[in-house]
Amino acid sequence: MASNFERMIQLAGEVFAAHNDPTQLDVDEEVMEKLERLHPATLSDYDEGAGPVVWILLIPTTISLMNQFIRGEISETELLNNTPVNIKYEAIYLCSALVLPEYRHKGLATKVGLDAIHQIRANNPIEYLFTWSFSKEGASLAQLAAKTEGLKLLERPARIKE
């Protein structure tokens, strides 16, 4: 049987297929290092001891870059690469939220996502949450997080898979 980590990698490939889509962020060691420099809470997970069962990826950024992304003028990779390090961020991009099937509908993604948003907001004047949803669940998570946190929600036209 595959480990939780292996299952999460497989799930990411099935949901996003980022290797085949240059508009999406393909998370590798270099990307993870850049995310860590932006804020330690950009990559968050929930692990009950047997490996991750929830992964949340957030990108804190500027309003200007957020607007360029929402309009489709830049890709996820460009959003990350153009986001400066060591500034005050005004927006958070909910890039991805993955949950293993047997852990869904338990509120874990919401808890992990809100905890990460709180950590980023602790030192940043965040006004916006934005997303590019690939699922109805992802869109719902973004709506709930924005409402809970009192953030304005912006959405790039979704590519929701049925």
Image (spheres, rainbow, N blue to C red):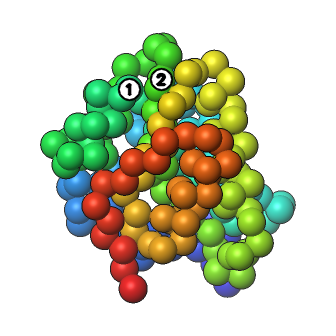
Q: Residue at x 39, y 48 (%)?
A: 154
Q: Residue at x 72, y 43 (%)?
A: 115
Give the mark count.
2
Closer to the camera, 90 or 116?
A: 90
> Of helix, strand and loop, which one carries label 1?
loop
Residue 70 at x, y = what percent? 28, 46
Residue under pointer 2: 89
Residue type at mark 2: give it. Tyr
Question: Quadrant of the image for the N terminus?
Answer: bottom right
Residue 102 shown left or right of residue 117 in the figure: right
Give neighbour class at mark 1: few <14, some 14-19, many 20+ (Cα, 10 Å): many
Q: Residue at x 48, y 23 (%)?
A: 89
Residue 78 at x, y = what percent? 25, 38
Is the Cβ of the residue at disc 1 closer than 8 Å to that at disc 2? yes
Residue 16 shown left or right of residue 49 in the figure: left
Residue 75 at x, y = what percent? 24, 46
Along the polypeptide, which appears first: circle 1 or circle 2?
1
Residue 33 shown left or right of residue 115 in the figure: left
Give neighbour class at mark 2: few <14, some 14-19, many 20+ (Cα, 10 Å): many
Residue under pointer 1: 62
Closer to the camera, 3 or 95?
A: 95
Residue type at mark 1: give it. Thr
- The answer to whether residue 133 is above or below residue 81 is below
Residue 60 visible in the snapshot: no
Q: Which mark is residue 36?
A: none
- The answer to whether residue 57 is above or below residue 31 is below
Spatial CA span between label 1 and label 2: 5 Å
